[in-house]
Amino acid sequence: MEPVWFTFLNGSDIAQLELTDDEILDAVEDGLRAQGLGETVIEPRVHLVPDPAFNGHFNVLRGYIAPLALAGVKIVGDYVGNYRQGLPSEMALLNLFDPRTGMPVALLDATAITEMRTGALTALGARHLARPDAKVLGHIGARATSYWNVRLLDRIFDLSEIRVHSRRPESREAFAERLQRELGKPVVVTEDWKTCVEGADIVVEASRLERPEPLLKTEWIAPGALVVPYGTNSAVELSLTDVMDKIVVDDWGQAHAGPFGALRAHVDTGRLNKTNLHAELGEIVAGRRPARESADETNLFWHRGLSLSDIALGAAMLKKAEERGLGQKLRFS
């Protein structure tokens, strides 16, 4: 048998790629479009909890995108207390395979991929479900994905007011400083949830709760707003879905499965089901379901995280790395 080689991209390689905001958004949107056109296979993510005492778990995401001729598996660790050791809360590896032979194509440090594609999914959901003139963002959480939420939302909407809040004062202050430095506009740090989200055009809930707690009150949501909750443990009230005109998810198969997710209780109690779900975002991107249809719609987009987004963004990185001569060729056999 001839030698089999695959490409390895480490974190330094990926940083040197310097993907633009538009490259990130376009890659993730291409993955969503393929999903909406039925050109993908996605299996609900599964979880491994090694020991409850470690206060963390692994997510395993799997998928296939026919137009890219790639299958992929990503394993991401989600450890909420890692900041105490100076480590990121989420670290990941993405494996890409040739779906025709099963042979490995690439292995990528997917920590940045996870952060970028999560922000892209938030922003693309807003592109289709928020008011086009949305200018005020209320963002809860300062986790690694939060930066890309705000950066890519600002890319699309050119926000005039950005409010941020997180549990630890030092994290929210550092988060705001980074955003101000990178975006070149002021960021308001709030002391509480209500001040952050009340009356905002777009509300993103990316908190890092250790257990479900309804800290985001439904009464704070302005008519016509878009709410994007994606915390591992729910921070919203059961009544949140009652005020929504459209509820959209990234993938219903994984939205109604597994123990985690911002709307877990809504699915388990029957408040969110296949009947009252408006669409998967890919169906909207592909033109098969309507996006926002009026200025007074109040909408919700819940994303659990798509393996398809990881694969699509990983493929874009792999292509750019080849063009720039980055990465290492490793021998598999």
Image: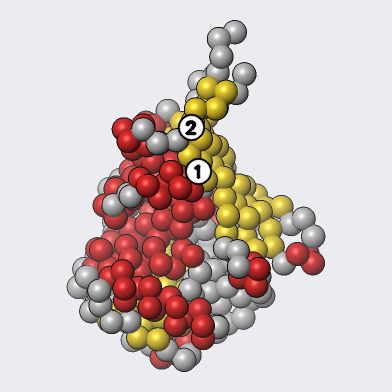
Q: How are the residues colored?
A: secondary structure
Q: Residues within 10 Å of mark 2 (few under 14, many from 20)?
A: some
Disc 1 designates what residue? 10
What residue sits 33% from the left and 58% below the top?
A: 124
Q: Is residue 80 left or right of residue 37?
A: right
Give how far across and how far down residue 303 sits, in percent: 47, 60
Residue nearest the viewer, comparing 152 with 277: 152
Q: Is residue 217 above or below residue 330?
A: below
Give how far across and how far down residue 208 sits, in percent: 57, 73
What residue sits 42% from the left and 46% below the top?
A: 14
What residue sits 60% from the left and 23% below the top?
A: 332
Q: CA separation, marks 1 and 2?
A: 9 Å
Kind of residue at disc 1? Asn
Give how far across and how far down residue 309 sits, in percent: 43, 47
Q: Are marks 1 and 2 in contact (CB under 8 Å)?
A: yes
Give the quarter of the figure containing the N terminus: top right
Residue 33 appears in the rendering: no
Q: Quadrant of residue 89?
A: bottom right
Residue nearest the viewer, comparing 46 with 97: 97
Q: Is residue 16 above or below residue 143?
A: above
What residue sits 40% from the left and 86% below the top?
A: 189
Kind of residue at disc 2? Gln
Mark sitting earlier along the chain (1/2): 1
The residue furthest top is 1
Disc 1, SS:
loop
Disc 2 designates what residue? 328
Q: Is residue 26 left or right of residue 73?
A: left
Residue 144 appears in the rendering: yes
Disc 2, SS:
strand
Give how far across and how far down residue 94 sits, in percent: 54, 42
Q: Quadrant of residue 174?
A: bottom left
Give the quarter of the figure containing the C terminus: top right
